[in-house]
Structure formats: C-alpha cells, structure tokens
Amino acid sequence: MLQFNRTNRTLRGYGMHPVLGYLLGFAAFILLSTYLFHQTTYGGPVLLLLALGILAKMAATGRTEFLRLVFGDRKGRLIRLLENLMISLPFLVVLLYQGAYAATLLLIAGSGAMAGLRLKGRPNFTLPTPFYRKPFEFTVGFRNTWYLLLPAYILTAIAVSVQNLNLGLLAMLLVWGISMTYYLRPEPAYFVWSYAVRPSGFIFEKMKTATVFAAGLVLPVVASLLLFFPQHPEMTLFIAFFGFVFLWTIILAKYAAYPDEMGLPEGVLIALSIYFLPLLLVMIPFFYFKSIKNLNLLLK
Amino acid sequence: MIRIKELHKQYGENLVLKNVNLSFSGGRVYGIVGENGAGKTTLFRCIAGLEDFQGEISSEFRPLKNHLGLLLTEPFFFSNMTGNEYIRLLCNARGLSIPDPEARNVFDLPLRQYASTYSTGMKKKLAITAILLQENKYFILDEPFNGVDIQSNMVITEIIHKLRELDKTVLVSSHIFSTLRDTCDEIHLLKKGEPVTTVDKQGFDRLEAEMKAATIGNKLEKLGIK
C-alpha cells in the first residue's frame, strides 16, 4: 500500500493523474514489448532479462534488511515475494501471450528465488569512464548505464553483419536515448550556484560538454553505419543530427523546469516536437528563455 | 569586506532573519552561533546568494558568490562520482583546472573511490578540500567540525588559521564552543533570526557562560538523576 501511495505521489509530481499514469505506462509497455517481439526473435530473453534486472534492484540489501527489520523475517520475505510477483505480472502476461513459455517459467522461478535474496548494492570498484575530466552528467551517467550502452554497440555490430541498416539506426537511437537520460534529473542548486558564469554561459557550457561527450558515444555507431551502408548516408546523418538537437532541447527543458524535475508540460512539448520537427524552432527558444529566467537567481 | 544592511528574510509568514546588520573584513574569522532554527544557515545562504532576501549584502566583488567557498552542513554527493571528480567539478565550475587533485589531498582521502560511499566526516573533508582548491577570497563553513575525527578537527582548525593569515574572510558556525574559541576573532550570537550579541576574544568566556546559563539553567535538576 505504501509503495502504491509513493508511486501515486511520484505521478502527481509529474503533473499527471495516477490513473492516467498507470494507463499510459501499461499501454507503453504493451506497445514496446509487442514491437520487440515483432522486430526480433530474442523478445522472450530480452523481456526476461529486463524483468530480472528490475527484480535484482528490488533485492538490494538496504531495503531487504529494512523490510525484515520492520516486519520480521517471515512477513518480510512474504512482502518481497508479493512485490516480485506484482512486478513480474505484466511481463508474465506478455510472455505467455507471445508463447515464450520457457522465459515465463524462468521468470516465475526467478521471482520466487529473488524474494529471499539480499544483493549487495554496489561493489567496491570504481568503473573507469572517458568522461572523468568534465563531471558530472556523462561521468555519472556513463557509470549508471554502461550495461545499456554495451548492447547498443553489439546491436550495431549485428546490424553490420546482417546488413540491416534499420537495426543500426535503432542502435543509434538507443545511444541517443541513453545520453538524454543523463539530463533528466535536476541537480541540487549548489552545483548550479558554484558556476562563475552568467546563465547563458552556464547553458552554453552544459550544451558544449554534452555535444562533445555525446559525439564520443555515438561516433562508433555513426562511423560504422556510414562505412558499411554507404548507399544510404542520409538516414544515418539525419538521426545523428537530430540526436544532437534533441539532446540540446532536453538540456534546455531541464533548466526550463529547474529547480523542479521536468514534468508533463515539458514532456508533451518534446513529444510533439518529435512528431513535428519544425516545432523545435519554437521550442528551443522557448525553453532557452525560460531556463535563463530560472537560472538568474543562482547565477546573477 | 562583506557588508550586510537591514537584512530580512521570511518564508511565507515566518520571519527567519530580521534587522541583520553585520560586516566581515579580511584576515578575520567570525563565528555565528545560535540554537537550532536561529537562522544561521539561512544567513549563510543569503550571503551566498542561494536565497532571495530584503536588504543589502555588498562586497568588493560582483557577484560575491564567484569568490565564495561554501561548505554546506550536509554536502550532497552524486552517486558514482569519485572524490577526484567532485573536486574537478567544483573547480571546473570556477574555470580552474586541477590536473592532479591527489597531490593536494591534505586529508588523505581515498579520492579514487565514489564519494557517496564515504563516511560523514570524509564527505565533509572532501567538500572542504574542494572549496579550498577553488581559490576563494571568502569562506562560509557551516558546521565544519561536525562528524569529523579529532585529527581532522585539528587540521581544519589549522586551515582556518592559515586562511586568516592569507587575509581571507571566514565565517564559521559550530555547536561546539571550544572550536570557535580556537578559531574565531569575533562571535555573533543569533536569536530568533536577529544578532543580539557580538563579542571579541576577551568576551568568549562570558558569552559561553551566558549561553550555558540561558540554555541549561536548572533543566538538569528536573531530570532528577541519581
């Protein structure tokens, strides 16, 4: 019940009615998983790994110990089992519907087994990053998402080997999508305040760093696609270019909402821009001037 | 020099700072004391420019914040960011490049480890290191001695002495009077958002005795400890 209330609060924080949030989330999940099964033969294993990844997060030592401390050993484990089943349920429905029975059975077994697990949150190991000289977004983001970037590069290699440009473009979109997530959450005011620049200089600095570092991430994909699909460079360059434009838009939208997190209005405006690209000509200046206004208190 | 004139700050109906008129000059260390909620942190945040306020805060620098090192009571650290990277982030923000933070690691911190895994004291020491490397003229240290071990306490005290020697202006808040006695030239007592007493070194003992009397009084007798 507490988790349900917390989720409701989070959705309200995004400016969305919880019921609408659940419906949108459910619809997005069904659409994406159907697309996944439609596009590849690895839909079952991918969905299974995704579900197990979420379950592993839920088995983090801190929260597991807290539950057992508050509710006792037996009740704590039961709560964990219920949580796991609730999380697995949508995945199980899709897997069953798609006839991925082996993945279904593995997920049920995993849900049960992981209810009794306490996974140590983070190993005492510092992951090297090529972005360490200019913290923080890409430095922290790379460490949080390296395991998602890896499949994107593998997907590029597969695209080249099976001569499927669309798959390569999907890999590039994945890299762009991951890079953009680095700018979704607002940092504490102290880390904006610390900058000895005007708001416009701050925004420019953020966009410059993002451009250089994102170029580093996306370059292997773009170069591979241009090299191995020389007959269709236009789609590769189109997505590469608009990847940068949307990355800048996300940065501007982040500070347009600052110090709050980006909410429904910014999300809707960005989504509309994806469907109608010329809208970016209005969105970018709109977010820019709003950002400048928001940053003025901290950087005047 | 920082000059504060007729500073007022309120959150909604709640007036948290009123009639603050203070000045802080170079080569001196100022202690700000007061009970929880007296307005110390809010005063610091106003000086830093992290809060809007009524009144005037001026200095030879415009804006002051670009020459100010601010140590927050509980510094924030991003997950998956090393100590080295934290220092780089804060120095980059001031347009400074620190090629090798390890060489300036006065507290012997494990700078290659993620800062979010540090203990409370280590986090504080990292935050202090970063603002020292920013080459500031002014320093605001909100509870710098909280949670740090006795050795680091001594190092921080020496750092404050060194900053005074270098003609920097330092504002310190602390709930441990002895640390203020060791470091400050002047102490301002805040009560309900208003500076009510200012004492120099000669008056520290008297201020401590007054604060003790006002805070403790005969409360311990109520406990009836046997």
Image (spheres, rainbow, N blue to C red):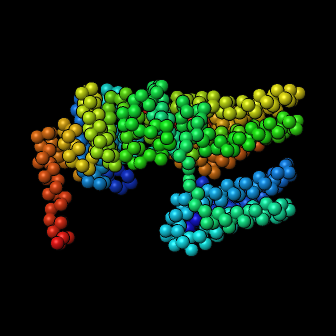
Quick one: A50 or A191, which is closer to the camera?
A50
The quadrant of the rendering that contains the N terminus of chain A is bottom right
| Quarter of the figure with residue A233 | top right
Q: Position of residue B103 (x, y in %)?
A: 42, 28
Using residue A56 as the reference point, say whether residue B203 is left or right of it.
left
Q: Quadrant of residue A89?
A: bottom right
Query: Is A141 situated above or below A100?
Result: above
| Residue plotted at (59% across, 30% down) | A209
Q: Position of residue A123 (x, y in %)?
A: 56, 48
Q: Where is residue A67? Give x, y as percent.
A: 53, 67
Residue A151 located left or right of residue A18 = right
Residue at 41% from the left image edge and 44% from the top image edge: B123
Residue A252 visible in the displayed image:
no
Measuring from the top left, give residue B184's x and y in whole percent: 21, 38
Left or right, A236 with respect to B24, comes to: right
Which residue appears at 76% of the width and 62% of the height? Answer: A106
Q: Is residue A118 above or below residue B39?
A: below
Residue A129 visible at all? yes
Q: Quadrant of the C terminus of chain A?
A: top left
